[in-house]
Image (cartoon, grey):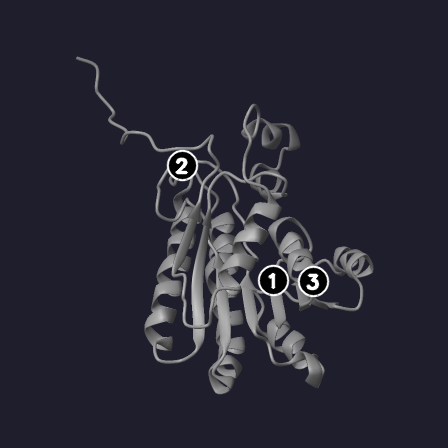
């Protein structure tokens, strides 16, 4: 298989690239940071092809895909992993610029890459679109606001892909991770390494390799099997009651 992974320069994306390459597949590793991609290519070898791609820029995506040589063009698996969270302030205090960046990356970027890769899959009548969402999509929490909404978009987009692709051999899945460490996610979100470390203090969160294993498992099911959604939480994370705010008597 040929696997295209966005956001492949670190975290989930790098682990997903390693997992597929280790199992004999060819990987197109896409991200903005070419230096990190080149390090990954040195580590993995010729089965990994690094390409510069900014998913928020349609021209960047089109240019990157057009640069692929003929023997790399027939993408079998697209892993829409590029995404981010910014800030934890309540909606009325949050940065509008942060909201715009999250929507541009998590929604517009994912949709753009999918729309440009999907026609080839449909024409070949084979392929798999794997979208990486978050438990912030189905489960609201204070400070998630635009981030949670952007990940809810990913879930609905994945389901609608299934509706459009019914009757073809092209599959779609939404991977929904909960608390996950070992990535730059909280460092980027909080812009504070010490605060980011506290998010995972005294916990055993999911790691990038856990998500890579899940993605690989979904794509290696028999061709007639479509895993619509796979929600994964670490055992340290669970559910709580709905919040009730009471006024002083």
Question: Residue 91, relative to residue 118: is it above or below?
Answer: above
Which of label 2 and label 3 is nearer to you? 3
Viewer-side label of 1, 2: 1
Choose between 9 and 75: the one closer to the eye: 75
Residue 62 lies, in percent from the top left, at 61, 77
Mark 3, other Cα within 10 Å: few <14 / some 14–19 / many ≥20: many
Q: Is residue 239 left or right of residue 110?
A: left
Residue ID for mark 1: 6
Q: Position of residue 75 (x, y in %)?
A: 59, 76
Mark 3, secondary structure of its residue:
helix
Query: What's the CA distance linking mark 3 and mark 1?
Result: 15 Å
What is the spatial separation of the Cα atoms under label 2 and label 3, in whole angstroms? Answer: 41 Å
Name the residue that disc number 2 marks.
Answer: 90
Secondary-structure class at tag 2:
loop
Establish if 226 lies above or below 165.
above
| Quadrant (top left/top right/bottom left/bottom right) for the C terminus | top left
N-terminal of the pair, mark 1 or mark 2, is 1
Q: Position of residue 32 (x, y in %)?
A: 68, 60
- Give the residue furthest to the left: 249
């Amino acid at each position: 298989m040929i696997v295209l992974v966005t956001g492949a320069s670190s975290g989930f994306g790098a682990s997903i690239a390693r997992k597929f390459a280790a199992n004999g597949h060819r990987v197109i590793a896409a991200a903005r940071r070419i230096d990190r991609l080149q390090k990954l290519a040195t580590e993995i070898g010729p089965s990994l092809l690094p390409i510069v791609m900014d998913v928020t820029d349609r021209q960047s995506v089109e240019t990157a895909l057009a640069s692929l040589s003929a023997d790399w063009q027939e993408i079998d698996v697209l892993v829409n992993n590029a995404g981010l969270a910014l800030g934890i302030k309540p909606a009325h205090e949050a940065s509008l610029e942060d909201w715009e960046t999250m929507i541009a990356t998590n929604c517009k970027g994912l949709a753009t890459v999918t729309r440009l890769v999907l026609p080839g899959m449909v024409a070949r009548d084979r392929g798999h679109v794997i979208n990486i969402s978050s438990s912030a999509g189905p489960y609201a929490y204070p400070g998630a606001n635009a981030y949670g909404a952007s990940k809810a978009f990913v879930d609905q987009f994945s389901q609608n892909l299934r509706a459009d692709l019914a009757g073809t051999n092209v599959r779609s899945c939404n991977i929904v991770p909960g608390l996950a460490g070992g990535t730059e996610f909280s460092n980027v979100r909080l812009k504070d390494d010490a605060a980011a470390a506290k998010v995972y203090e005294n916990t055993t969160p999911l790691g990038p390799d856990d998500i890579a294993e899940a993605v690989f498992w979904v794509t290696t099911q028999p061709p007639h099997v479509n895993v619509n959604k796979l929600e994964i939480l670490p055992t340290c994370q669970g559910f709580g009651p709905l919040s009730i705010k009471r006024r002083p008597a």
